[in-house]
Amino acid sequence: MAKIGVLILHKKTDRGKSKTKSFDDLLYLGLKIILEDLKQEYEYISFVNIKDYDFVLVSLTSVMDVENIICTLGKADKGKCKIIVGGSGCINIRSYIGYIDIAVFGRADNQINEIIDGAEFDNVWRKDKDPELKGSYIIRQVNKLNEKENTIGCPRKCYFCQYTWTRKMIGERYHHGIDLKVDEDDFQKLEIKRSGRYTTAFDGLSASSRIAVNKTWCSVEEIKNKINGIYNNQKIIKPVNIKLFQIVGFPWESEQTFITDLKENKSYWRRVDRKNKKKRIIFMYVFTPFSPEPLTPMQYSRANIIDNWREYLGGAKCHNIYGDKTTDIEAFTLPQIPGGFTLAKRVLINRCTKELKEKIVKILEYPKQKSVYVMVKNVIQYIGMDIFNKIDPQEAGFNYLKTYCNVNKLDGKAESKYKELSSAKKPSISS
């Protein structure tokens, strides 16, 4: 009987020092489901004893885990052990293909035992069968919800969101689960019935950007109606705090549009503020730079690693958009905006090709410096800008993967829609 280990990945700064003994306290539901399927016993292990196992399972939940697997396995002695990776972060495997033996794309429910036994599936890559990654693979969908799952997928089809384009919707509605300490939903469906904290997203400072990325339901009128609902709810006495995620740096955006859109936001909040000091609605903007994610309609779009959005907001401090403690509405930005180097690494991992693999791994392994500007400049000098610009579909490093629908038919849709809106009367949050 094969000896199986489950690898605990470690960060570059504390590899080998993690005190985590299991994934029970982490949001690794997919891995938990797989481990429940296993017919054999398993152990949680670190990289130092990989060679003592026949198979080691690795769960990748994001591109950050890709950095960690390169760091973790780069110096590990794996012996004859076969490394199996899977999870939502297992998309483009080219940057770490040298460290693994098997990759599972999408759901692996009721597959893991057969995969270990050597069975072949159209969502499973095997190094011994396809060492050059010349085959074609699919993102496997869920057949049946696990008892721990309420829904899978999202009915919205925002052009930038990998989640909705790689998972068919199963269940009544998009649901984040009962583990969250605050209410969270898309803005249209978010129910604000009491004072407290909420999390939602506009994902676009202007109505033009939101329409362009197919977020048409997050309209100016919807925003106004939601605020009026809070105003008119007699049960809401204490403040309502809304953490509002915003995407910045879409291909059509720049420093100037960023500043202009913030001014329009200020104008809108000023107009809907009743200024009677009876209801406090606080919007905390959390910015995330746009990343062209594989298997989405915007997968080939340009990634802006140059603009420093945090710097435009005044650096490491909150930036006031509108209001204060004397107004009903207050809106400000939080300073934690990922910089250009963080985005650059994400794009490099997502778009890694066979030709660029060695250079990209060196960038991922390079110690982080204090100056993000210097790091971005060094990346551009070392690898060039082509990989960050709009790319040709034939040159995409992830083109061996297919999802459940044809996203390529929507290539360029967002950019053309924004151009169309801009040439006409430009709608905005303040219109």
Image (spheres, helix red, strand yellow):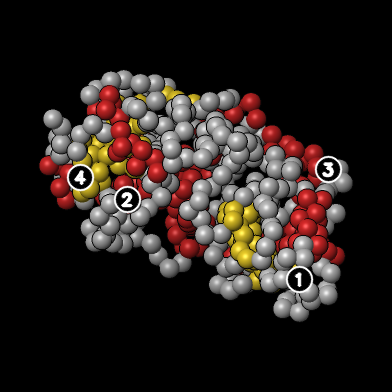
Position of the N terminus, as image quadrant, is: top left
Give how far apart the Cα atoms at labels 4 and 3 are: 60 Å
Residue 381 visible from this viewpoint: no
Question: Where is residue 10 shown, x and y percent of the image?
Answer: 29, 55
In which quadrant of the rendered view does residue 332 lie?
A: bottom right
- State which mark lies toward you, 1 or 4: 1
Residue found at the very far front of the displayed protein: 235
The mark nearer the N terminus, 2 or 1, is: 2
386 vs 390, nearest the viewer: 390
Vertical comparison of 42 with 345: above or below: above
Residue found at the very far right of the displayed protein: 425
> Dot 4: within a 10 Å radius of its alpha carbon, few (fewer than 14), some, or many (20 or more) residues?
some
Contact? badges 4 and 3 (CB < 8 Å): no
246 vs 284, nearest the viewer: 284
337 vs 22, nearest the viewer: 22
Q: Amino acid at mark 1?
A: Lys
Question: Where is residue 35 shown, x and y percent of the image?
Answer: 30, 38
Q: Which residue is mark 1?
A: 279
> Dot 1: within a 10 Å radius of its alpha carbon, few (fewer than 14), some, or many (20 or more) residues?
many
Q: Which residue is mark 4?
A: 43
The mark nearer the N terminus, 4 or 3, is: 4
- State which mark lies toward you, 3 or 2: 2
Q: Which residue is mark 3?
A: 423
Q: Which residue is mark 2?
A: 23
- State which mark lies toward you, 3 or 1: 1
Query: Which residue occupies 43% across, 46% down?
Result: 62
Which secondary structure, mark 1? Answer: loop
The mark nearer the N terminus, 2 or 4, is: 2
